[in-house]
Image (cartoon, grey):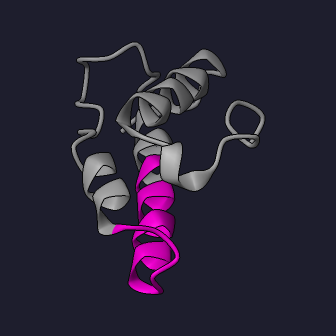
């Protein structure tokens, strides 16, 4: 909301989602929680597309953003 709250949903794309994810990393969130939050954002767009509030293209573009992989990102890992 802080980064893209002013942007219409139809203009929110993969680069914006990656920027949101980078902000989560900067706030020292753990990788699993970041992936869950990014998934929640994508599901929100899927819901909007299913209600014809957005075009499916917006949601489909967001699905191109892959989740963070274990030990392959700057995100903090949690203890096992």
Where 67 falls versus 56 (above or below)? above
Residue drawn at x 58%, y 30% is: 29
Above or below residue 70? Residue 33 is below
Q: Main secondary structure of the magenta part?
A: helix
Vertical relation: 10 (above or below) 34: below
Determine whether, in the image, residue 65 is placed left or right of residue 42.
Answer: left
Q: Nearer the viewer, residue 47 or 57?
A: 57
Q: Quadrant of the C terminus?
A: top left
Locate residue 11, reporting x and y percent.
Answer: 51, 44
Residue 8, how many percent across, how many down? 63, 49
Q: Is residue 34 magenta?
A: no
Q: Residue at x 50, y 53 (%)?
A: 10
Q: What is the quadrant of residue 2 in the picture?
A: top right
Query: In the rendering, at what x and y percent does residue 19 appear?
Result: 51, 24
Q: Between 24 and 52, which is closer to the camera in this rendering?
A: 52
Range of residues picked out in magenta: 38-55
56 to the left or right of 13 = left
Q: Is residue 37 visible?
A: no
Name the foreground residue: 59 vs 40: 59
Q: Is residue 46 left or right of residue 69?
A: right
Could one spot residue 80 in this view of the protein? yes
Residue 35 in the image: x percent, y percent?
40, 45
Residue appearing at x 76%, y 40% in the figure: 6
What residue appears at the point 23 percent right and 31 percent down from the top-left corner? 69
Quadrant, the N terminus: top right
């Amino acid at each position: 909301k802080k980064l893209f709250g002013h942007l219409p949903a139809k203009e929110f794309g993969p680069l914006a989602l990656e920027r949101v994810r980078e902000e989560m990393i900067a706030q020292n969130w753990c990788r699993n929680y970041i992936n869950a939050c990014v998934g929640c954002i994508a599901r929100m767009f899927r819901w909007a597309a299913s209600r014809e509030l957005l075009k499916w293209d917006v949601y489909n573009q967001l699905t191109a953003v892959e989740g963070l992989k274990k030990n392959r990102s700057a995100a903090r890992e949690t203890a096992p």
